[in-house]
């Protein structure tokens, strides 16, 4: 499909490399800044940024080294998978290490005769370094985040003008990094935290390794992807990452949440309608399938798709054609489909609530996203610090510190709402701790399940009395009501505890028992 032309990110970053050096220098930062808002593969982003840097400064090679704030050394890659090795170097070793340690640019005109130069890499690779230009990635007055290293200027050695440009660019690059997942947890810390291989997706536990592997492979094709896992695990973020790293990344990414659609409006939402198709249809309206043409359609909670709509959606997947409601003209749309569900679709198929042929269509690639409790204590701590920092920046407050006791409480909690619940907790803590002090009463309980045995006599009793003879609809409605009461009226939290979306919760609460004949 890609025809050997390189990934979409590489293509976008390399466009214009044949232009003059001045033009390339001026466009470089704008190109990078526009991509840093996406959930792109960070290895690819840094690698292609190096290609552009080398072109802009007429260098033979360029390398971006980041300072790993946890290990205190330099690293050239951010991928965390075993099959993608990293290159590391201690601070203070070689020209790059000195620049990272001291925070001052260095221009080396004759590397072979410079005592500061470390030739070990040349010995291993066979590459011959003649001259170098290395500058720290840092904002004025702030710690060093990494270094940019340029090797072997084409022609004369690097000039003082080249050095001045690279220093200015590195200052802007430091600002850009603050907008990525690589930003430091505290601005006073040297370096960055390596939180995960994809921008804006935090997680590096072994439980996520297979998720990232399948995500990368899926992004290389147009195959349909089904993301499965509990509510709040981040399936939407992963869907966007697949799109942003695919050949369709410049085209629309259109989201349809099946839980929010009344059954009678599903087909109109997906395929659009003509004027007069139904009461209130006063104009032609394109559907989400049409809007997503050329890009990606993300159908969230596909398990909620009404049975009557599953057949029409399957027909669209089979031949790419559809009709607007009230229309007779067949239309076509080329879209890549990504779906997500918290339900066991295999069980839904067995219960005849979901079409088996549609299930086979949507799960060409299945990616099972693990719950937060399965990702380990270290992952919970990384995510908690990330969210505390995120909201501290947003609300201009100090990020609360996580002491050993606080971390123990976080890891003991079951997090039934998963990453989404953890993020909501972190935001609440920042709002309620203006001085940055995390009090014990703000920590989550040691058990996250409803009706936890640790309840004291003073706590309200949310037990549900269910007499025999009730219909299943009435039992479900009463349980949903009590779950909402236990969540103090918080519909998002109640939906997470029930393992459904907010739209499904609303329908459960409205359900009334059918009258018996």
Image (cartoon, rainbow, N blue to C red):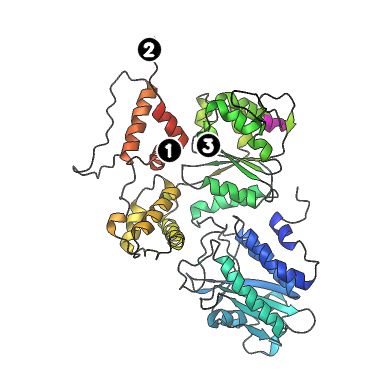
Q: How many marks?
A: 3
Task: Considering the whole magenta stretch, tell me its main secondary structure.
Answer: helix
User: Looking at the image, which residue is at 66% across and 77% down?
Assistant: 166
Q: Is residue 317 magenta?
A: yes
Q: Quadrant of the C terminus?
A: top left
For the residue pair 397 and 19, the one nearer the viewer reads as 397
Tell me how far mark 1 sits from mark 2, CA to CA: 30 Å
Residue 98 in sight: yes
Secondary structure under the numbered disc 2 in the rendered image: loop
Q: Is residue 145 left or right of residue 513?
A: right
Q: Which contiguous range is marked in magenta?
A: 316-320
> Counting other residues with Cα less than 10 Å from the Cα at mark 2, is it few (<14), some (14-19), or many (20 or more)?
few
The one nearer the camera, 494 or 44, is: 494
Q: Which residue is mark 1?
A: 499
Residue 69 in percent (x, y) is at 49, 71
Helix, strand or loop at disc 1?
A: loop
Rendered image: mark on residue 516: 2
Drawn side of residue 121 relative to residue 417, left or right: right
First along the sequence among labels 3 and 2: 3
Q: Secondary structure at mark 3?
A: loop
Foreground disc of the pair 1, 2: 2
**Cα–Cα gap, marks 1 and 3:** 11 Å
Q: Which residue is mark 3?
A: 301
């Amino acid at each position: 499909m890609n025809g050997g032309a390189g990934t979409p990110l590489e293509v976008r970053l390399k466009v214009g490399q044949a232009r003059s050096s001045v033009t390339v220098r001026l466009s470089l930062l704008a190109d990078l800044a526009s991509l840093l808002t996406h959930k792109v593969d960070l290895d690819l982003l840094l690698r292609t940024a190096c290609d552009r840097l080398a072109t802009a400064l007429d260098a033979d090679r360029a390398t971006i080294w980041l300072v790993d704030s946890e290990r205190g050394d330099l690293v050239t890659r951010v991928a965390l998978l075993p099959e993608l090795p990293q290159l590391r170097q201690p601070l203070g070793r070689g020209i790059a290490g000195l620049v990272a340690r001291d925070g001052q640019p260095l221009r080396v005109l004759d590397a072979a005769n410079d005592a500061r130069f470390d030739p070990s890499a040349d010995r291993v690779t066979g590459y011959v370094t003649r001259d170098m230009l290395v500058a720290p990635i840092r904002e004025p007055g702030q710690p060093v985040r990494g270094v940019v290293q340029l090797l072997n200027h084409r022609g004369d050695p690097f000039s003082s003008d080249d050095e001045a440009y690279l220093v200015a660019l590195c200052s802007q690059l430091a600002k850009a990094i603050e907008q990525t997942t690589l930003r430091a947890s505290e601005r006073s810390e040297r370096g960055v935290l390596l939180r995960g291989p994809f921008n804006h997706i935090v997680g590096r536990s072994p439980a996520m390794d297979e998720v990232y592997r399948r995500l990368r492979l899926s992004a290389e094709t147009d195959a349909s992807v089904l993301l499965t896992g509990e509510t709040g695990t981040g399936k939407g973020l992963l869907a966007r990452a697949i799109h942003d790293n695919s050949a369709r990344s410049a085209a629309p990414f259109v989201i349809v949440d099946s839980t929010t659609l009344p059954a009678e409006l599903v087909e109109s939402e997906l395929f659009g309608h003509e004027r007069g198709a139904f009461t209130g249809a006063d104009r032609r309206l394109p559907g989400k399938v049409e809007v997503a043409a050329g890009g990606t359609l993300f159908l969230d909670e596909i398990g909620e798709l009404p049975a009557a709509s599953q057949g029409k959606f399957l027909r669209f997947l089979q031949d790419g054609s559809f009709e607007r409601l009230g229309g007779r003209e067949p239309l076509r749309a080329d879209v890549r489909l990504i779906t997500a569900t918290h339900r066991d679709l295999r069980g839904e198929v067995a219960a005849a609530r979901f079409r088996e042929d549609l299930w086979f269509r949507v799960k060409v690639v299945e990616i099972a996203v693990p719950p937060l409790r399965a990702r380990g204590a270290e992952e919970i701590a990384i995510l908690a610090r990330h969210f505390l920092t995120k909201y501290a920046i947003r609300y201009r407050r100090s990020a609360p510190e996580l002491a050993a006791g606080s971390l123990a409480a976080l890891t003991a909690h079951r997090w039934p709402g998963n990453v989404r619940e953890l993020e909501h907790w972190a935001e609440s803590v920042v709002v309620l701790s203006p001085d940055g002090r995390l009090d014990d009463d703000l920590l989550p309980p040691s058990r996250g399940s409803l009706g936890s045995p640790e309840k004291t006599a003073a706590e309200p009793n949310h037990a549900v009395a269910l007499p025999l003879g009730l219909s299943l609809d009435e039992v479900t409605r009463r349980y949903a009501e009590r779950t909402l009461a236990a969540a103090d009226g918080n519909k998002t939290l109640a939906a997470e505890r029930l393992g459904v979306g907010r739209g499904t919760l609303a329908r459960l609460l409205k359900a009334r028992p059918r009258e018996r004949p």
